[in-house]
Image (tube, rainbow, N blue to C red):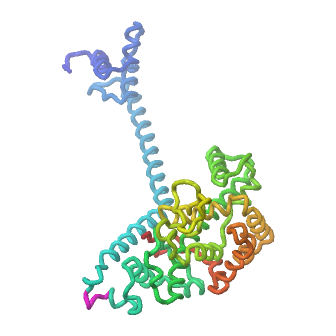
Amino acid sequence: MKKDIPYRDQLIELSKLYKINEVRSYLQSKKHLTTSQIELILLKNKIPLPAHSYNKKKIAEIKFKEQVITNIVLTIALLGFITSLITIRPYIKLVTSEVKFTHIAKEYKSNFQPKDKLSKNSNKTKKLDSSNEDLGMDTKITLNLFEDLEYNLKNIRSGSHVKRVYLRQLPKDLKKIKSTQKKKDTFIKIVMPLILDENSKILENRKKLFKILSKQHNSRGERVWLKRRFEDYEIKNEDVTELKLRMDIIPVSIAIAQAAKESGWGTSRFALEGNAMFGQWTYGKDGIAPLKREKNKGHKVLKFPMLRSSVQAYKNNLNTHLGYREFREKRAELRRRNKKISGLALVDYLHKYAATGREYTKVLKIIINQNDLTDFDNAILMNSSSQSSSLTL
């Protein structure tokens, strides 16, 4: 732009160049705009002015005001960023630990080789019990992993927290472990973290539920959350009393006992082929047909993509099916009396789970008592913010 062009004309040219409609509309309507007004319009649209400028004091004030606003916005953004970092720090630690333990899991798998290729001096080979040398690779990896993580039931019974070790499926040759006690302990160590994790999620939701119900007015997000919980627990007419009845934990001792009974301590065909630990039936396609099924029967045992899915379906079954209403009512009564929710206090109310009825609950009691499973009703899953986080295999 040439220097001999009048300053006002320079401003008008700038407004045309940057397509400032406000100036153009004023000019088209033949309204008179002062030089200062044009300057202010250009500044408002963040257009730099020519070197020569009228009303410099006013323009300086505008620039100062814009700078102050910019600084305030940047400060708020920075504080928000710092606050978000503090808020998500536990989740960052959890994800970091997940990655770390997943890497460890891969190392375990890569460090194991077929039996004929194992080095005689291998540290991994030295760890293996000589009585279990015919075990498959998955079982060897699982046993050594538990050993390296110092994950044992004796410590848990003494009050130690349960390691967050989640197996996707059971070792295929778990039944080859020669020691019956070791086989049972291994199964319990596989199943217990999954059960506790589901119970932990239920307790978190239960806490949120009571917090929402204590308010006189709920936000839109809280109402949406509540509606989804009604759907999850298959409750019609948004019956809050029924939701409180259904949204509660399953005692660990009962869940382990039923998993042991229905899966043969993790050795049944349904458990190994379909991750089905609780023997739930289905009449759909997604199931495994029993070999000795009667001809007039069309049921199958429901199969799952991973063990966790089986535990989730089992939990949903006990918390929603009409056949276990008495179980849920007794559990609620224990809550009202401020009593511990234990397996032995509730196991008698699961007689409708199997065709054998009361005989079935007697068997569950025997499993619970013989294996001291009530010790695990007080078990606590290791906090996600602790040094040893979760490991999924």
Residue sitting nearer the eye, 128 or 145: 128
Task: Determine the residue positioned at 62% across, 59% down.
Answer: 296
User: In the image, residue 157 lies at what x, y percent?
Assistant: 60, 85
Please tell me whether residue 120 belongs to the stretch shown in magenta: yes
Q: Quadrant of residue 293?
A: bottom right
Task: Determine the residue positioned at 50% across, 67% down.
Answer: 275
**Magenta segment, prevailing SS (helix, strand or loop):** loop
Residue 216 placement, left or right of 103: right
The residues colored magenta run 119-123
Identity of the residue furthest to the front in this view: 295
Decide if residue 342 is in sight here. no
* The N terminus lies in quadrant: top left
User: In the image, residue 290 lies at what x, y percent?
Assistant: 54, 66
When the figure is inspected, residue 46 is found, relative to residue 222, above or below; the finding is: above
Residue 256 placement, left or right of 361: left
Residue sitting nearer the eye, 17 or 191: 191
